[in-house]
Image (tube, helix red, strand yellow):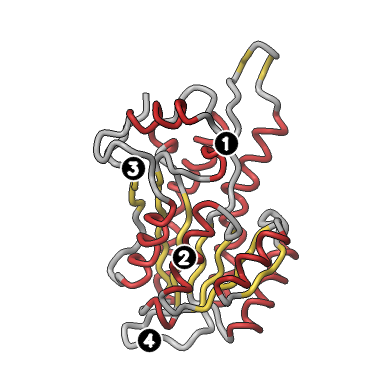
């Protein structure tokens, strides 16, 4: 599948990894619809890249269905879905304020895991109606995991659990959708220079970068976008999770 001929929906596309992916796809000639809760930022990015925007709550079935309907109306079809919407909390199972708040754990699972599945299943239903290409391909789904799924640190119980779920559903979803010509992949980023990290002091960011073996720096969101684009075009990649972390193994 050629990136220049794809019609993609990207959740979390108003910032961070999602924005970088939206910009990379659009620069390569793809049609892009950004799905995000931040209407102002989402509309601005969509306008800058010549794409479209749909205000979306990934945990809400009706919201996602409406966004997918709008994306299809604007682009004519949907061939790629990239899920970058997510949240992260740094809370220990039991800390100085008591046990981990259950609502924070639930929200993390709902957005990172349930939200990814919600978008994936509804996008896949839409992709299933596409005319297949010469290899029978109808679409590609790319979900965002994390190296925390494998190397979760202190305070990451909720985040690691949510991303572990993304890893766990990659292969069975790929198997479920194989007969329809839809591939499913996941990317597990390491420590990337997203808006969340940009708010940290420079010395803290430098300390995080020093832990990365090679290259010893934070990841550039554009690198995530380029990998997502490569996955779209590399038709034999399916049912796998790719770590993008400079060989970082968190302790």
Name the residue tied to disc 1.
199
Q: Secondary structure at mark 2?
A: strand
- Of 21 and 161, nearer the camera is 21
In the rendered image, residue 212, in percent from the top left (x then y), is placed at: 31, 34
In the picture, measured across the screen, residue 50 lies left or right of residue 106, that is left
Name the residue tied to disc 2.
141
- Outermost residue on the left side: it is 214
Name the residue tied to disc 3.
245
Q: Residue 133 falls in which quadrant of the image?
A: bottom left
Q: Residue 4 falls in which quadrant of the image?
A: bottom left
- Of 183 and 25, nearer the camera is 25
Q: Inspect this view and state whether residue 171 appears.
A: no
Which is nearer the N-term, disc 1 or disc 2?
2
In the rendered image, residue 246, in percent from the top left (x then y), is placed at: 29, 41
Which is nearer the N-term, disc 3 or disc 1?
1
Q: CA distance from mark 1 to mark 4?
A: 44 Å
Name the residue tied to disc 4.
133
Q: CA distance from mark 4 to mark 3?
A: 33 Å
In the rendered image, residue 90, in percent from the top left (x then y), is placed at: 58, 28
In the picture, measured across the screen, residue 158 lies left or right of residue 54, that is left
């Amino acid at each position: 599948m050629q990136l220049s001929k794809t019609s993609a929906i990207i959740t979390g596309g108003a910032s961070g990894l999602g924005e970088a992916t939206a910009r990379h796809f659009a620069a390569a000639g793809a049609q892009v619809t950004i799905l995000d809760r931040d209407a102002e930022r989402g509309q601005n990015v969509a306008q800058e890249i010549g794409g479209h925007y749909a205000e979306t709550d990934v945990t809400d079935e009706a919201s996602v269905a409406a966004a997918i309907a709008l994306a299809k109306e604007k682009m004519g079809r949907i061939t790629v879905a990239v899920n970058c919407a997510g949240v992260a909390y740094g809370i220990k199972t039991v800390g100085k304020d008591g046990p981990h708040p259950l609502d924070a754990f639930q929200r993390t699972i709902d957005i990172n895991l349930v939200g990814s599945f919600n978008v994936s299943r509804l996008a896949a239903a839409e992709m299933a109606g596409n005319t297949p290409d010469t290899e029978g391909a109808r679409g590609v789904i790319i979900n965002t995991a994390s190296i925390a799924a494998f190397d979760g640190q202190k305070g990451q119980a909720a985040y690691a659990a949510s991303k572990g779920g993304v890893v766990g559903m990659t292969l069975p979803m790929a198997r479920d959708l194989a007969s329809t010509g839809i591939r499913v992949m996941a990317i597990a980023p390491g420590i990337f220079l997203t808006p969340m990290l940009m708010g940290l002091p420079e010395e803290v960011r430098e300390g995080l970068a020093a832990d990365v073996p090679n290259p010893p720096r934070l990841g550039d969101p554009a690198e995530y976008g380029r990998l997502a684009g490569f996955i779209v075009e590399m038709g034999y990649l399916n049912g796998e999770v790719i770590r993008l972390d400079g060989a970082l193994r968190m302790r």
